[in-house]
Structure formats: C-alpha cells, structure tokens
Amino acid sequence: MKKALLFVLAIAAVLSVCSTVLAADLPTINFWTTGSQNVQDVFAEVIKAYNAKEDRAANVELQFILSGTGETSMRSRYIAAYKAGNSTDFDILGENGMGFLQIVQEAEQEGIENPEGIFVDLDFSKIPNLENVKMVPCIYPEKLVPYRGTTVVFDYDSAFVPEPPQTWDELVEWMKANPGRFVYNDPDTGGAGSSFVTAAIYRMIDDPDAFKNASDPKYQEMWDAGFEWLAEIHPYIYSSGGHVQYAVKNQGSLDLLGQGEVWMTPAWADGTLTALENKTLPETVKMYQLSDLSLTGSDVDMAVCATSQHVDEAYDFLNFVISPEAQQIFVEVMKAVPVIDTSLLEQTASVEAVSLLNPADFNIVSTGANDALLKERWAEEIATLN
C-alpha cells in the first residue's frame, strides 16, 4: 500500500511539473483596462478562470489603471508604444465605445497616419462565441468585441414614489410637485450624471440622427434648448443649506437616495444592483426607464492592439470573455449586463436581476470630443446658477 501511494504521489508530481512547463511555454499577453475597483475585481476573476484552462492559448496578465488616476495615461501610453514601434507590452485593450473613439482621435492628433490602424481588423471566424452576442459596438464594429453592457437608469424609492413619472414631461411635473427630492451628479464626476445631461440636451435637438451622430461638432450649436431645460429644473434639484447641491460622483447620488434625502436619481444599473445586494439601498428602491427616451448606456468592448505579437492567442482570450462561463462571472461579481442571452447562464439571483435589462435595447451614444465641451458648458451655465 505504501509503495502504491508513493507511486501515485510520484505520478502527481510529474504531472504537476509537466503542467508547469506547459504553462511556462505559453506566451504571455497583456490585457489593459481602466475603470472603478469593480472592473479590476471582475477581470481578476475572469483572467484567473482563463489561466486555469488547460486548453488555453496563452497566459493573460491584467494591467489595470484605476479610473480618475490615469485614464488618459493608458491612452497616451499605448499611443506612445505604437509610435515607438518596438513595444510588446500591449496586446488587448478594454474600453467603452467612446473611449476607443478618444484613443483614435488622440492618435490622429499625435500625427499617426492611419489612426484607426492602431487596432487590428478582427477575423470573427476565430471568435465562435460571437454568434451568441446580442450587442453591437457603437463604433468600429470591425475592430471591437463587446463583453458587457452598461446603462444608466432612473432609481426611485417606491416607498415614497408608488407611481413614478413615465415620460420626460411627467418627470418635470413630478420634480415641481416634489422639490428637492431629485438629484443628479455633476456630469464631470460620474457617468450617471453625464448620461442624464446628455439625454436631456440631445432629446431637444430636432434631428432624428442626433443621438446616433452625437459626436458631430455641428450639434454644439443646437444645445441651447437642452441647457434651458436643465436651467428650468435647477430650482427643484436637491438642496442643502438653502442652496441647490449636485451630487459628487455616481456614489453621491446613491448615498442621498439610500439616506432618504432624495427619492429619485439617475444611476448605473450595476451600481444600483450592487447597492441593493449590499443593503446600502433599501429594498424599496426600484429602477426603470422613461417610456419616451431611455437614459444612455454604453457598450464596453475589447480590441486587439496592432502592437501585439500574439494576435492569434488574443483571439482565444476574446472568445473566452464572451463565453457563458466568463459572462456568468461578470454578472455575479459586478452585476454587469451580459452581452449574451441570460438563458445561457445559471439562473442565480444576480442573473434574474439583470435579465430585465436587454443590451440590444440600450440607448448607446458616443459624444466623442463633444463630451468635454458639454461638461464645460454645464459647469459654466448650470453649476453657477446658485
């Protein structure tokens, strides 16, 4: 018996060594992304699951830059690496559609002759799981693979608002009837407030393609009506000490909602679901969209860098990220909206919670360079109304 046990242990040791050697023989590819802490957390789990696969094509390492500490740095670092022409540190980038547009625009400003060429035109036949993906990237569809959906919704506390407003006009009437019970965050401090401001302004533009082509500079001359509307609702926004106060960051709005200071606010769907799970929001908080125009969302995508020396291996990782196994991780860890049908996932409480949000229906908008100008004008004309 002792000899048999020693034999089994010897075989296990040999297999372990072989496995280590095989792993060492695989190329290492770097996945770069940015965002909040939950983005780092979820990709740590996804990459852990991928690197545990025996049939993987590579070992993946996460290169993460925390939002607010260097998003521009990631763009600039990749563009510098591309211009240098000798970097192998960049293989895959993860960003939202607007982020990829900004990278290409910065590449153009840096004098790169073919700025869109900094990302690979993908061979989708090498990404078989793409057939299950329901979301289409808002830009560069030949280069991007969506891996999660994200959207801003209206959160409301049903304990105080049993019948929430259903249209934008009804929303204004509700604000006037409930002064101080609505808030949105400063758009320069978080995407929820930015989504609200963008939707409020672009819905007032008399052009059916305004949302589709929101980055076109011509729309800057058509923002006046939207800013007048934002000025109109200003007196009915949450106030403290006798002064209107716009929340700071997405979390600031959720904090006010959780404390009962406000009864309604725009918020990210994943942030809302996480707060409900963590009980920092009361269970009476619900989320929905207005019937005549939803708040904006975003496709969050992956692209293969033209600097990569391991493009074929990168396809294998992209394919894994949109697999049911990885999509389940995105839902469970960060309450992300999966890009595949939820029927392909294990029906957990988290999956049931996000199943009400269909990424195919998201109002995806890319304002591009207009984004910074819109926020600057808001800061000058709305934030100063006090």
Image (cartoon, rainbow, N blue to C red):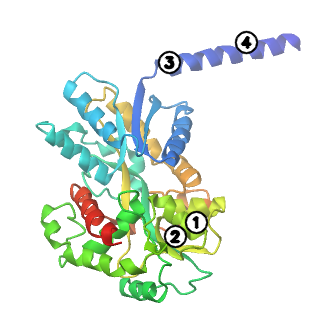
Q: Position of residue 176 (x, y in %)?
A: 43, 87
Marks 4 and 3, how far apart at CA: 21 Å
**Vertical side of 237 occupied by 145: above or below:** above
Asked whether disc 1 touches disc 2, contact meaning CB atoms under 8 Å apart, the reply is yes
**Disc 1 or 3, which lies upstream in sequence?**
3
For the residues marked 1 and 2, what is the alpha-carbon distance in whole angstroms?
7 Å
When asked about the image quadrant of residue 161, the answer is bottom right
Q: Secondary structure at mark 2?
A: loop
| Residue under the point 42% across and 49% down | 129
Please state which amino acid type lies under the numbered disc 1: Ala
**What label sits on residue 353 in the rendered view?**
1
Helix or strand or loop: what does disc 3 sit on?
Answer: helix
Quickly name the residue at label 3: 24
Circle 1 SS class: helix
Instruction: Name the residue furthest right.
Output: 1
Q: Check disc 4 and give the amino acid type.
A: Ala
Q: What is the spatial separation of the Cα atoms under label 1 and label 3, in whole angstroms?
A: 40 Å
Instruction: Determine which quarter of the picture holds residue 85.
Output: top left
Going 47% across and 18% down the picture, which residue do you hit? 25
Image depth: mark 4 or mark 3 in front: 3
Q: Which residue is mark 2?
A: 356
Q: For mark 3, does the 10 Å Cα neighbourhood hold few (<14), some (14 to 19), or many (20 or more) residues?
A: few
Residue 356 lies left or right of residue 112; in this view the side is right
Sequence-first disc among 2 and 3: 3
Residue annotated with mark 4: 10
